[in-house]
Image (cartoon, rainbow, N blue to C red):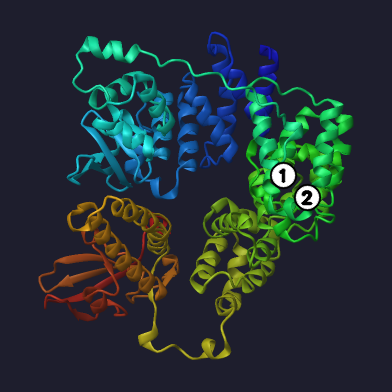
């Protein structure tokens, strides 16, 4: 690709990034003779600038994140704009349990002096760092525990038979250590007796095979000097290291080709082997006939059971098939492939689920093949119901004008397409009519759908987050409703996926952007929404005081939910693995690692029970609704004056919002109960026995309200 073509492609990506274009740019940059020129690096700033919105938080799609990370790994891009985009890409890619300040610091994301390629080296090592993997440092070998993302450390248990464990800074591991996966080869590498029987070539091959990240030759030498070549003089070591094993007899070439594979898996393996050997040429007539016969013989139940494998094979076969041969080749699959249903608009979602698993690099090819085998209208009908993961690549193969017309004519009601429209409203030319599809009625309808396959669950969760938290999304809800606030309140009455606290908080946030909505809520619509889903008895009869939930801020509620999610999905599974590893070490009576893992299991179990019990009786509320009128409520600032005229100011907050250092008091504490629901002028007795008078009650300042939401 010449420079002019590359420049044109960069401009296209800045306007509308597709997986294929991003991969083409990366491939061109990797193959550039003499490295990437400063001029090309400067032109890439067009892309970074287009992805960098000064007013909003940068939101990148997975393929954009991968492109940024690959670019950083090449080591030539380094500017303030690029670093900002790089931070967004890494934070979007990190698992939630690692997306913490201490981990970001260990990666060096905030260190402007650290080159981006070094950040990516650490980032990839962090993703490879798993509980039970082997860690090599200058101090020797050890096994890794789970990273502590709060303190930025990781427990390393020495492989010295003593079971001693020490917390090591995560940054040190990411900078200097080498990681090897467990297995027989690794046990030979770290055992001085077994390693001494290995020649240098075998040792190097074993290290490369088990390495979870690239290992430099100097690191391999250090490993060898500790075990395989322990005790050798420098001259003896150099002679041993440079020796080679006799060449093995060459194996006869495998006569099979991808066109005569006996299973879908074998065809894919053979295609990959041919590509690696530079033999990925256009199929001959004989090869097409063999593949057509295979697809004809393929059983329908096999096509359903191995749908993902079939899609991968189609994506790899299509580029090697002449256009005139493609339709005849794939025609035998039309009644078998579940991802090509006869009527996409009514087919069960399970049939389309495979689109959510096809690798990103193959999605564009699959979309093009679908158009060739069917037509553009069929692909659009499929797109209306595909999971969000597939939509970017699929929609990139459709002319924007045709897609806009189809969206304008469709009654969009799925979370995935609604999110795609919202995220792409600035990237491609979508008509106002299409953008108005993102309205509260459609959003509530999408979020009310139940029992969706898991491939559609991620978009539903993200759309709910937008509805509850995103200020620009709230503005869109108001704009799409126009002068009809009743459409908003009517839709929210049916939003039973929201609890009363969430509905109340959402009402307050939406009302900030619309005076007519505020008036409508004050006229009684607000109470109707809060009563939605409650029985007549629940609306009329107050619950007994003992059954009253603990109220807390939205922020504290989300924090507790996040901790519970981290326990269930990360820490408890990691603890199970740690127990398995510890059990494998043998005698439990002197197995300190096993005892520690059991103690950790007991602690995690207790903490999970505590969180589940607390959350079951916890109600998040927006503290903006406090209207004190001289009475102490949750979400008020109270001034107490003692007999000597000394004033003390407390902020009365929810059950989990206390912070003694800032005089934030939970209303459930003894001090909170002493002043709760008491009026200005009343005398109160504090827990320490002193008496004070309530002299002032005010609402929370705006900056604190924003902090607690």
User: Which residue is found at the position 76% from the left and 37% from the top?
Assistant: 397
Left or right: 185, with 35 as reference point: left
Q: Residue 333, position in %: x, y?
A: 82, 46
Left or right: 239, with 275 as reference point: left
The residue beneath circle 1 is 310
* Circle 1 Cα neighbour tier, 10 Å, few/some/many (<14 / 14–19 / ≥20): many
- Choose top left, top right, bottom left or bottom right for residue 44: top right
User: Which residue is found at the position 75% from the left and 22% from the top?
Assistant: 281
User: Which residue is found at the position 53% from the left and 61% from the top?
Assistant: 509
**Closer to the N terminus: mark 1 or mark 2?**
1
Q: Residue 695, position in %: x, y?
A: 24, 72
Query: Can the viewer see residue 427 in this picture?
Result: no
Q: Residue 464, position in %: x, y?
A: 57, 59
Q: Residue 5, position in %: x, y?
A: 70, 16
Marks 2 and 1: in contact by CB < 8 Å? yes
The residue beneath circle 2 is 337
Quadrant occupied by the C terminus = bottom left
* Circle 2 Cα neighbour tier, 10 Å, few/some/many (<14 / 14–19 / ≥20): many
Q: In the depicted view, which residue is nearer to us: 561 or 701?
A: 561
Quadrant occupied by the N terminus = top right
Q: Is residue 454 above or below residue 307?
A: below
- Choose top left, top right, bottom left or bottom right for residue 204: top left
């Amino acid at each position: 690709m010449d420079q002019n073509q590359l420049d044109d492609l960069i401009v296209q990506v800045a306007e509308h990034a597709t997986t294929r274009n991003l991969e083409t740019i990366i491939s061109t940059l990797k193959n550039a003779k003499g490295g990437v020129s400063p001029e090309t690096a400067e032109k890439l700033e067009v892309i970074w600038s287009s992805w960098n919105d000064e007013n909003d938080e940068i939101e990148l799609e997975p393929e954009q994140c991968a492109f940024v990370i690959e670019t950083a790994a090449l080591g030539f891009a380094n500017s303030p704009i690029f670093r900002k985009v790089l931070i967004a890409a890494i934070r979007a890619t990190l698992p939630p349990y690692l997306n913490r300040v201490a981990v970001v610091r260990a990666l060096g994301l905030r260190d402007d002096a650290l080159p981006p390629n070094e950040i990516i080296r650490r980032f990839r090592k962090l993703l490879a760092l798993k509980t039970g993997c082997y860690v090599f440092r200058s101090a020797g070998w050890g096994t890794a525990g789970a990273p502590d993302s709060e303190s930025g450390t990781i427990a390393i248990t020495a492989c010295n038979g003593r079971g001693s464990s020490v917390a090591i800074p995560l940054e040190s591991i990411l900078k200097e250590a080498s990681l090897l996966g467990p297995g027989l080869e690794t046990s030979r590498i770290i055992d001085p007796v077994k390693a001494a029987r290995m020649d240098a070539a075998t040792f190097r091959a074993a290290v490369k095979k088990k390495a979870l990240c690239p290992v430099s030759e100097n690191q391999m030498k250090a490993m060898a000097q500790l075990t395989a070549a322990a005790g050798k003089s420098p001259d003896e070591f150099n002679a041993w290291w440079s020796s080679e094993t006799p060449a093995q007899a060459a194996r006869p070439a495998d006569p099979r080709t991808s066109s005569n594979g006996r299973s879908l898996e074998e065809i894919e393996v053979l295609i990959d082997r041919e590509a690696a050997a530079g033999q990925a040429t256009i199929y001959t007539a004989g090869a097409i006939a063999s593949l057509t016969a295979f697809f004809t013989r393929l059983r329908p139940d096999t096509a359903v059971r191995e749908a993902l494998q079939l899609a991968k094979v189609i994506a790899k076969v299509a580029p090697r098939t002449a256009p005139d041969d493609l339709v005849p080749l794939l025609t035998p699959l039309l009644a078998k492939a579940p991802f090509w249903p006869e009527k996409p608009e009514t087919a069960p979602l399970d049939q389309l689920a495979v689109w959510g698993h096809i690798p990103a690099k193959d999605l564009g090819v699959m979309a093009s093949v679908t158009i060739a085998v069917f037509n553009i209208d069929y692909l659009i009908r499929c797109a209306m119901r595909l999971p969000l993961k597939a939509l970017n690549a699929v929609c990139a193969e459709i002319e924007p004008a045709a897609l806009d017309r189809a969206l304008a004519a469709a009654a969009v009601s799925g979370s995935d397409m609604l999110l795609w429209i919202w995220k792409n409203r600035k990237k491609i030319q979508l008509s106002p009519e299409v953008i108005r599809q993102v309205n509260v009625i459609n959003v509530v309808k999408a979020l009310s759908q139940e029992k969706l396959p898991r491939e559609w669950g991620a978009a539903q969760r993200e759309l709910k987050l937008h509805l509850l938290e995103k200020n620009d999304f709230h503005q869109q809800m108001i704009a799409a409703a126009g002068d009809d606030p009743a459409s908003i309140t009517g839709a929210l009455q049916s939003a039973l996926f929201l609890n009363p606290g969430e509905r109340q908080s959402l009402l307050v946030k939406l009302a900030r952007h619309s005076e007519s909505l505020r008036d409508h809520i004050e006229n009684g619509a607000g109470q109707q929404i809060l009563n939605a889903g409650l029985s007549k008895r629940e609306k009329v009869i107050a619950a007994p005081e003992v059954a009253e939930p603990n109220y807390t801020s939205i922020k504290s509620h989300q924090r507790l939910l996040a901790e519970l999610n981290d326990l269930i999905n990360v820490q408890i599974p990691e603890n199970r693995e740690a127990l398995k590893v510890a059990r494998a070490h043998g005698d439990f009576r002197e197995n300190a690692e096993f005892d520690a893992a059991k103690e950790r299991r007991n602690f995690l179990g207790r903490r999970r029970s505590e969180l589940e019990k607390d959350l079951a009786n916890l109600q998040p509320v927006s503290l903006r609704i406090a209207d004190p009128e001289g009475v102490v409520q949750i979400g008020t600032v109270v001034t107490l004056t003692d007999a000597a005229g000394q004033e003390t100011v407390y902020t009365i907050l929810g059950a989990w919002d206390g912070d003694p250092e800032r005089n934030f008091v939970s209303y459930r504490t003894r001090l909170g109960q002493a002043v709760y629901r008491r009026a200005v002028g009343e005398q109160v007795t504090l827990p320490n026995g002193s008496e004070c008078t309530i002299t002032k009650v005010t609402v929370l300042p705006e900056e604190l309200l924003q902090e607690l939401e």
